[in-house]
Each structure stands twice: as structure tokens, then as C-alpha cells.
Image (cartoon, grey):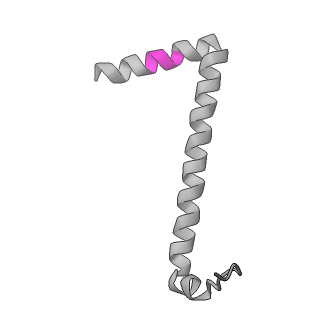
């Protein structure tokens, strides 16, 4: 068994620049969405008025 790292130049050549950009965009979008969810959860736990606002929005969505 050879433990040296393999050359990925062929694999990298098969991935187009458009696919690389799309992968980066998806990663950034997922990270931003996760950060937004964490921020909402933190605000919900720490700010009572935000909790009331959030519950009001959820009740409004539920009534649709």
C-alpha cells in the first residue's frame, strides 16, 4: 500500500468552473441559513418581546 497522496488533477479537471462556483454558493447559502436559525433561536430565548413577535407570526401562518 502506498500512503502518498494521490494526484487529483484529473478529477479537478472534470469539475467545471461553473460547478465549483455553484458548490461554493450552496455552501455559503447553507451556512447563512444555519446562522439565521441560530440567531432566531438565541433571540427567542433571550428577548421576551421577540418571542411574542415570533409566536404571533407563527400563529398568523398557522391560521392561513
Snapshot quadrant of residue 60 = top left
| Residue drawn at (60%, 48%) of the image | 31
Q: Which residues are magenta?
A: 53-57
| Residue drawn at (50%, 20%) of the image | 54
Residue 62 locus on image (x, y percent): 33, 21
Q: Residue furthest left?
A: 64
Q: Residue furthest front?
A: 1
49, 4: nearer the viewer: 4
Looking at the image, is 15 positioned above or below residue 33?
A: below
Residue 58 locus on image (x, y percent): 41, 21
Residue 4 locus on image (x, y percent): 71, 81
Q: Main secondary structure of the magenta part?
A: helix
Decide if residue 14 is on the left or right side of residue 60.
right
Q: Is residue 41 magenta?
A: no
Give the quadrant of the C terminus: top left
Decide if residue 15 is on the left or right side of residue 64.
right
38, 56: nearer the viewer: 38
Total numbered circles: 0
Snapshot quadrant of residue 50 = top right
Looking at the image, is 1 positioned above or below residue 64?
A: below
Decide if residue 56 is on the left or right side of residue 11.
left
Give the quadrant of the N terminus: bottom right
| Residue drawn at (55%, 43%) of the image | 33
Looking at the image, is 5 positioned above or below residue 58?
A: below
Amino acid at each position: 500500500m502506498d500512503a502518498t497522496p494521490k494526484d487529483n488533477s484529473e478529477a479537478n479537471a472534470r469539475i467545471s468552473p461553473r460547478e465549483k462556483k455553484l458548490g461554493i454558493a450552496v455552501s455559503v447559502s447553507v451556512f447563512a441559513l444555519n446562522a439565521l436559525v441560530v440567531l432566531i433561536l438565541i433571540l427567542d430565548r433571550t428577548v421576551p418581546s421577540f418571542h411574542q413577535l415570533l409566536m404571533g407570526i407563527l400563529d398568523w401562518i398557522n391560521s392561513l
